[in-house]
Amino acid sequence: TDALLFYTDGTQQMRIRSDGQVGIGTAGGSAHFQVQKNSGDIVYFHNDAGTGAKLAAGNQSFSAVSDETKKENIVELDKQQSYDNIKNIRAVTYKFKDIEVTDDDGKKTTYEDDKSRIGFIAQDWETKYSQLVNTDDGGVKSLLYTETTPVLLSALQKAQEKIEALEARITALENAE
């Protein structure tokens, strides 16, 4: 019933509580896995080439390695194509379906999701941007949300170009009168 504690130099660094919750740099809190650090990188997931994602203390989102020196074959997205492609991508609100789990003793527990969320549907992106969609062994699709940003920016830039062209035409027509 006791927690499993890990110490270095006489200071507790990590604990696994009897309820399964893990704390690094903290005794743990309400999250199943909690890490506490006051500065620097908290988490850095990367491959041997040093590309991946990190979460730094104080940040509210992961940052991805995006240094030009780590990339090759760089080609700018076609703005018109991005503009055309996003027309059929739905921005939706949704709830995850309830999940029923049966334990080893045959007892069934239903986990309900009452939280309304905002997002996309992976299948909508997959038709035009398959590189943004992963499919697991069970056929469940996941979307690389962060990587949708360049597509959306490219489409927005095209929309801005169209707005500016229309403004110029209006100005020209008004001046011709």
Image (cartoon, rainbow, N blue to C red):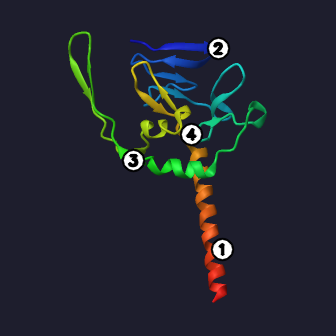
Element assignment for label 2 = strand
Q: Amino acid at mark 1?
A: Ala
- Say which of 151 and 162 sits in front: 162
Residue 168 shows which numbered tag? Answer: 1
Badge 1 or badge 4: first in the primary sequence: 4
Badge 3 or badge 4: first in the primary sequence: 3
Residue 146, position in %: x, y? 56, 39
Front label number (3 vs 1): 1
Element assignment for label 4 = helix
Residue 49, position in %: x, y? 72, 22
Q: Quadrant of residue 14?
A: top right
Q: Amino acid at mark 3?
A: Val
Front label number (4 vs 2): 4
Name the residue beneath numbered marker 3: 92
Compared with residue 150, is residue 168 higher up or lower down, i.e. above or below?
Answer: below
Look at 74% across and 32% down and name the residue there. 71
On the question of residue 54 being in view, the answer is yes
Residue 139, position in %: x, y? 40, 23
Badge 3 or badge 2: first in the primary sequence: 2
